[in-house]
Image (spheres, grey):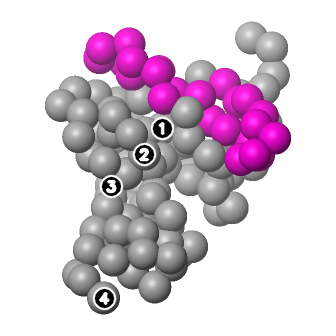
């Protein structure tokens, strides 16, 4: 097995790392299920780092505000993010350890 693979079907694990949240400052652990961690489970904010999930190829790096929730029959509930620097949008699957009160709050009319 190469260093860029793990035992979860060959997916790369080098991108599955913890980080400090750009918005609330909480330390965020790597995703326990081996998937890519791409948003804070506490405040749901993200950072504009990907073009495709886990590629870490975006140059922007700006904070991404959670702006809504969508539902996909294949992936379940999806967080919608908008970059506060460049306006780019992203969709991220909700993680099992996400703060569900924060997810529900995104679904309320403003």
What residue sits 18% from the left and 31% below the top? 59
Which numbered disc covers residue 53? 2
Residue 24 or 79: which is nearer the viewer?
Answer: 79
SS of the residue at dot 1?
loop
Which residue is under mark 4? 1
Alpha carbons under labels 1 and 3: distance apart = 11 Å
- Work out whether 105 lies above or below 37: above
Q: Is residue 18 left or right of residue 2?
A: right
Which numbered disc covers residue 90? none
Q: Nearer the viewer, mark 2 or mark 3?
A: 2
Q: Extreme bottom residue here?
A: 1
First in sequence: mark 2 vs mark 4 = 4
Mark 3 surroundings within 10 Å by alpha-carbon count, few (fewer than 14), some (14 through 19), many (20 or more)? few
Residue 34 or 108: which is nearer the viewer?
Answer: 34
First in sequence: mark 2 vs mark 1 = 1
Is residue 79 one of those drawn in magenta? yes
Which residue is under mark 3? 20
In percent of width and height, residue 19 lies at 32, 58
Mark 1 surroundings within 10 Å by alpha-carbon count, few (fewer than 14), some (14 through 19), many (20 or more)? many
SS of the residue at dot 2?
loop
Q: Nearer the viewer, mark 2 or mark 4?
A: 4
Which residue is under mark 1? 45
Among the 4 quarters of the image, the one containing residue 85? top left
Which residues lie in the magenta part? Answer: 68-90
């Amino acid at each position: 097995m190469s260093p860029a693979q793990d035992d979860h079907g060959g997916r790369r694990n080098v991108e599955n790392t913890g980080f400090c949240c750009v918005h609330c400052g909480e330390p965020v652990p790597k995703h326990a299920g081996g998937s890519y961690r791409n948003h804070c489970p506490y405040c749901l904010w993200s950072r504009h780092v990907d073009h495709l999930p886990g590629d870490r190829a975006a140059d922007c790096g700006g904070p991404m505000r959670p702006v809504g929730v969508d539902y996909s029959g294949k992936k379940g509930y999806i967080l919608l993010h908008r970059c506060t620097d460049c306006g780019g949008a992203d969709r991220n699957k909700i993680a099992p350890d996400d703060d569900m009160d924060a997810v529900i709050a995104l679904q309320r009319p403003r």
